[in-house]
Structure formats: C-alpha cells, structure tokens
C-alpha cells in the first residue's frame, strides 16, 4: 500500500502508464540513471532484485550495462512500482520526472 501511494504521489500516472513509458525510454534511461549510489541496494531491499541478480548487475563493467541489466528486469507493474520507489529513495527524482512526463514532453 505504501509503495502504491508513493508511486501515485510521485507521478500522477497509473503503474501501467509508467511501465509503458519506462519501456519506451529504456535506452535513454540507461544513460541517465545512477546505479552505484544506493539504487541497487534499494532494489534488493524492495525485493526487486534477488541476491543473484544483484551480484550479476554489480558484475557488469560499465554503469550503462548495469542500467541496462536493471531496466531489463522492469517487466511488470509491481516491478515498476518498486523501481520508481527505489529511484525516489535514492534522490533520482529527475528520472521519475523524465518517465512521468514522457521524456520531457508536456502531457
């Protein structure tokens, strides 16, 4: 319930719309997200990542590949909600804004 409230307050979009926007902007997002400053730990804490997935993502050589690995796992509304929550908790509100505003376009 808490995560859903955070999502709605953060984006004013449904989780379906957010997931669709995340998929649409996936390649651009991999250039913008900062995975190494708490995001992966938050994703693990929210049970978005398993321990094995966490280690696999951490083993990627570049931040772009780490981001690609994370974004490939956002395939359901539940995972989308957890991902948005982790972004919010790690101070990456600009990413949430980018996704919610369809890449910066006024809706």
Image (cartoon, rainbow, N blue to C red):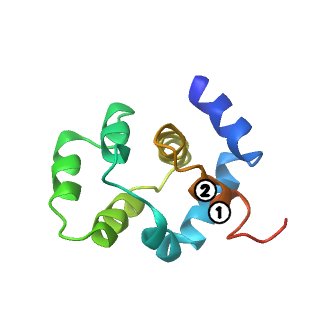
From the viewer's perspective, is 25 left or right of 35?
Answer: right
Pick the residue in front: 83 or 89.
89
From the top left corner, tell me how far across and down residue 21 is, in percent. Answer: 64, 64
Q: Tell me whether circle 1 and circle 2 mark residues in contact (CB < 8 Å).
A: yes
Separation of marks 1 and 2 at Cα, in angstroms: 6 Å
Helix or strand or loop: what does disc 1 sit on? helix
- Residue at x 52%, y 50% (from the top left corner): 92
Relative placement, left or right, of 6 versus 35 is: right
Work out whether residue 33 or residue 72 is closer to the camera in this orientation and state it.
33
Q: Which residue is under mark 1?
A: 98
Give residue 101's quadrant in the image: bottom right
At a point 45% along the width and 55% down the height, the residue shown is: 74
Q: Which mark is residue 27?
A: none
Residue 28, x across and y down, in percent: 52, 75
Q: Is residue 78 above or below residue 35?
A: above
Number of numbered markers = 2
Which of the numbered marks, if any, corresponds to residue 94?
A: 2
């Amino acid at each position: 319930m808490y995560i859903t409230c955070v999502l709605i307050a953060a984006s004013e979009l449904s989780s379906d719309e957010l997931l669709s926007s995340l998929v649409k902007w996936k390649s651009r997002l991999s250039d913008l997200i900062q995975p190494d400053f708490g995001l992966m730990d938050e994703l693990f804490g929210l049970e978005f990542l398993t321990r094995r997935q966490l280690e696999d993502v951490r083993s990627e050589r570049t931040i772009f590949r780490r981001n690609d690995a994370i974004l490939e796992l956002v395939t359901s509304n539940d995972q989308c909600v957890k991902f948005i929550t982790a972004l919010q908790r790690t101070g990456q509100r600009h990413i949430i804004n980018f996704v919610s505003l369809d890449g910066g376009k006024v809706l």
